[in-house]
Image (cartoon, grey):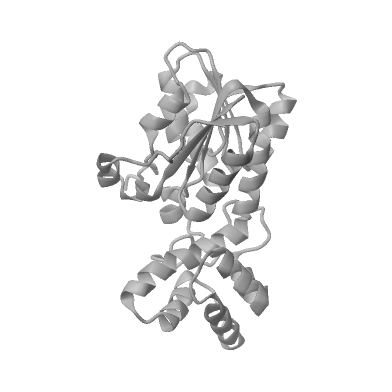
Amino acid sequence: METKTPYHEPVLLKEVLKWLKVEEKNRKVYLDATVGLGGHSLAILENSDTSFLYGFEWNEDSYELALKRLEKYKERIKLYNQNFIFAKEILQQEKVLVDGILLDLGLSSFLLEGSKRGFSYQKDEPLDMRINLELNLTAKDLLHRSSYEELVTIFKKGEVPKAESLAKKIVEKRKKKNFETTFDLVTLIKELYPSPKRINQILPIVFQSLRIEVNKELENLKKALEDLPEILKPGGRLVVISFHSLEDRLVKEFFKRDGRLKVLTKKPIVPDLTEIKHNPRSRSAKMRVGERI
């Protein structure tokens, strides 16, 4: 039986190339801080045949797949199986400043559908949610080791409605039975939010809240935003694509207050109807761009 190579549709691809000023013969250096399966990286390399690209991909499997996908450009790329919080440190060691940085914060379809780490509430998988397995704490650990107050904080930070009720129900449930798989958590959520419409709204937010906490995503984003302008050349651009309000709020506020960057997008750039129809998961994407002064 033939195994299909995983594929993830890069979001706002034309817009990314435009705002990063990717051109055929521009001899620029780019940083893709979240390579994923290499969709944006591949397009940058294909559309600028003299440019060099540094890439960071934290997930082990995605990193290996990206290496294979970008093999033909191995002379013009350098990929790291690291979180993007290390980009500044590593590129400064390389004595490199870049012309453009892409930070695409979306979780790839591959991680949702193929990682078997419990990112999706639609599959019954172990409650893991670690993007990288070197992390010690899983989503299961969070549900069992966190106090009631800690759970409330996690869910409130994720803007989950009835955070106190959810935390209380988890604490009560875990006394009787362990949370092992995603469906164990889904069952509990369905008990607390009986309306089908409400359940469909709540499930992604709860899972997102746990994933964000397990991987320290907001803390890592804050650090990256502070660091990345330091490795941009004057006139270089930082392009950030976020997929939920917690991320977008951080990016918007950072761009507004950081004196190193000139904001080029008064309003976020969003996918057009054609892209949303082709790739429904792109509908929540918001892109903001800043230029190094």
- Identified at 57% across, 68% down, the residue is 156
* In front of the other: 290 or 105: 290
Residue found at the very far right of the displayed protein: 93
Residue found at the very far top of the displayed protein: 25
- Identified at 64% across, 34% down, the residue is 228
How far from the left and from the top, in percent, is residue 157? 58, 64
Task: Work out which quarter of the rendered image holds the C terminus and state it.
Answer: top right
In this view, 173 is above or below 75: below
How far from the left and from the top, in percent, is residue 235? 57, 21
How far from the left and from the top, in percent, is residue 14? 36, 30
Asked if residue 26 can be seen in this view, the reply is yes
How far from the left and from the top, in percent, is residue 255? 57, 39
Query: Where, by quadrant of the figure, is residue 180 drawn?
Result: bottom right
* In front of the other: 214 or 262: 262
* In front of the other: 124 or 292: 292
In this view, 236 is above or below 37: above
- Identified at 42% across, 26% down, the residue is 17
- Identified at 67% across, 39% down, the residue is 226
Q: How many marks?
A: 0
In this view, 58 is above or below 213: above
Asked if residue 82 can be seen in this view, the reply is no
* In front of the other: 59 or 283: 283
In this view, 188 is above or below 214: below
85 sits left or right of 241 in the view: right
